[in-house]
Image (cartoon, rainbow, N blue to C red):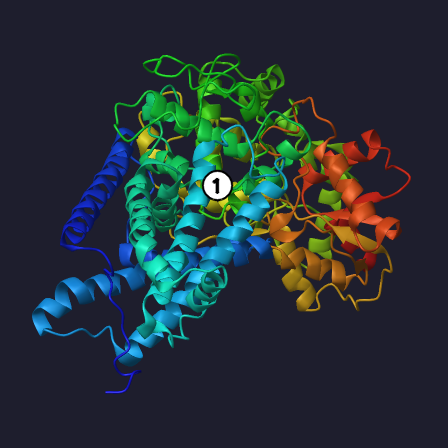
Amino acid sequence: MTPLQAATRETFWTIGPIGKVAFYWLAVVAILVFLYGVYARFAAYTRGSEDPRDRLSNLPARTVAATKTVLSNENQFDGDLYTGVMHTFVLWGFLTLLVATTILGFDIDVYRPLAGESFWVGDFYLAYQFTVDAFGLLFVVGVGMAMYRRYRNREGRLWGKHTSLEDDAFVWALFALGVGGFVVQALGIVGQPARADETVSFVGMAMAAGFRWVGLTPAGAEAIYGVVWWSHSLLAFAFIAWIPYAKPFHMISSFANVVARDEKAGARLPNVPADLDHTNAKSIEDFTWKELMDGDACTKCGRCSSACPAETVGRNLDPRDVILDLKAYRESVSDDPVAGNRDAMATDGGVAGAAPVNDGGTVPIVADEGGVIASESMESCMSCMACMEACPVDIEHLTSFTKLNRQLVDEGAVDSNLQDVFQDVMQKGNTFGESQSARGDWADDLDDVEVPDAREEEVEFLWYVGDYPSFDDRNKSVARALARLFDEADVSFGILFDDEKTDGNDIRRIGEEFLYLELAGHHVETFADCEFDKIVCTDPHSYNTIKNEYPEVDFAEFADDPMMPFDREEPWNAEGAIDVFHWTQVVEELVADGRLNLTGDELDYTVTYHDPCHLGRYNDEYEAPRELISATGADLHEMPRSRDDSFCCGGGSGGLWTEHEEAVKPSEERLREALEDTDAGDAVEKFVVACPMCTTMFEDGRKTGNFEDDVEIVDVAELLIEAVE
């Protein structure tokens, strides 16, 4: 047998029989502590309420999809190459070392006793050693990259009110495990002459050469090997046992979170039962098991904080802190032995203030003062879903935030301006407080275009116009432009006139769930009385809620509620038989079919385009508006934050109706980006939008930010009709 064929090594070199027994005993203890901790963690989620979504259906497919997401690190690479590479090195290095340890354990404890020989020899052993060295090196490099990013800038996104010693302990433990494994290997190579030619262990060989250079002899290596081996083993056992009790648990909970994700989270909020008590956030038990697991899945990476427009402009909201404040409070009032006060709830500052620990659950979850979460934080949220898009572990911030908003609405603790909006919608049917009889008056100036009444004649497209195009003077021009485009393309369309009310999208996200249900019930009953093939919406907010949320409403749940002004019991469009479109999707097809007679060189403006949150992140529609802009001949230049990274205008979730203390308005920051950070710079002539609410916010930001002489705000419809006419 050649030396290569006989290549192997003694696993327990210098470790005697008693040491082996102690090793196995400690291994069993560590694994049992680990398993109990994992069980206790997941058992604690039963304290939460039942989740209205079926998150565990088709579990095998969900698990496969989650495995692909996690192993590919695709979420970590999204917008951050450094983090993607770092996390890939750490993850794949850790998994490879774990698998290698498992293989070795199987050989020693199962295969050898049964077969009387070892498979951990020869070519397999050499390939094993090379793989372990290669991936072990990547692991150490990845952890080093993590440490560099963490400590290079202590004011960066990795640092916040919930940063604690456990974060440092986690990264340093990983580093010590990675480096310690190589030190043990190098000492073994120095002390065992038979391993002198084990060049496949290239990292160990290099370190062994370094040890020899500083004077370490084989006898010296043998003398200290046991101490170093035990130090490494004890650290490994301690780390395994520690995983469920601290930050390392995210390695398990994050995967579980991805498995249980709702692909349409945020775009469709969970329904609530008729029992009002089930809509609120009076205690931690009111949150679902998935919302509780969100807290454990959070890695404190700060991506949501960096993406949040409210945080960017200085509002009192950090989405990471909200999730972690809820987690810390849950642990502070829990009898779960796993739970601890790791996140220091008494820390000053941040979103929640200083909520008492172990208060027995008497602290309000959300309140102006003294609550776990400050009500101002929830009022600052724009429901733009930037936090959810940025999160690498699929935390569904918006579902928890909406629950907190419902609690504030139930208590009447909302901004007075929002109270006025609720009253206007309840009494008038729109957010402007105008008479519903005037809802179709915007069409009076269309001398050459007739706008049919969809209640009186059959049409192909039922056009849901929306509040702002109907009542806001600036946005009426958008409605007229779109009507002329439909007429020019010979589209069969009609509107509901005074039977159209506010769609309820933002009303719902502010927390007025039952007013939203009234609006949904009114509209689906109105739709049922009309003859049409498809629905087209001017506003992405309307498009989202009619497409994604109206079909979800269980009207039968509220059939006996005298407060609900509808008689319907059946779901609406549950099978998706009626297509719902944003107008840009419809007109894009018209342009492609040549029905608007555009040649693509009508306009020569230099423009940039703002992706509306409810069209882009909510519904993944990015191309239709861009195709229409290109069809006019305009020269489109993208802003650095575009598509799914688009920066919110600030109008969502009540932002249109409230005032905030902020360093700069979101609309002003966005316009600055358009004129300073875009490649075209101040050559940008028109800032193009595809949402009436965005138009309103940016027109305001153009004035308050002193951009009136620099750029013009135009809707895609206005740009198109100029090209057509």
Q: Position of residue 490 (x, y in %)?
A: 68, 59
The quarter of the image holding the C terminus is bottom right
Q: How many marks?
A: 1
Could you classify mark 1 by the number of other residues whose Cα lies within 10 Å: few (under 14), some (14-19), or many (20 or more)? Answer: many
Q: Position of residue 535 (x, y in %)?
A: 54, 49
Tell me the amino acid under the disc marked 1: Gly
Q: Position of residue 302 (x, y in %)?
A: 55, 39
Residue sitting at 60 percent across and 15 percent down? 416
List the single residue furthest toward the bottom: 1
Local secondary structure at mark 1? loop
Is residue 678 visible to the viewer in this orientation of the structure? yes
Please state if 620 lies on the left or on the right of 73 as rendered: right
- On screen, 678 above or below 45? below
- On screen, 691 above or below 48? below
Please state if 177 lies on the left or on the right of 519 as rendered: left
Q: Position of residue 163 (x, y in %)?
A: 50, 32
Please state if 337 lies on the left or on the right of 272 as rendered: left
Residue sitting at 25 percent across and 42 percent down? 34
- Residue 249 versus residue 266: which sits nearer the camera? 249
Is residue 504 visible to the viewer in this orientation of the structure? no
The residue at which mark 1 appears reads as 266
- Classify residue 69 by image quadrant: bottom left
- Classify residue 594 by image quadrant: bottom right
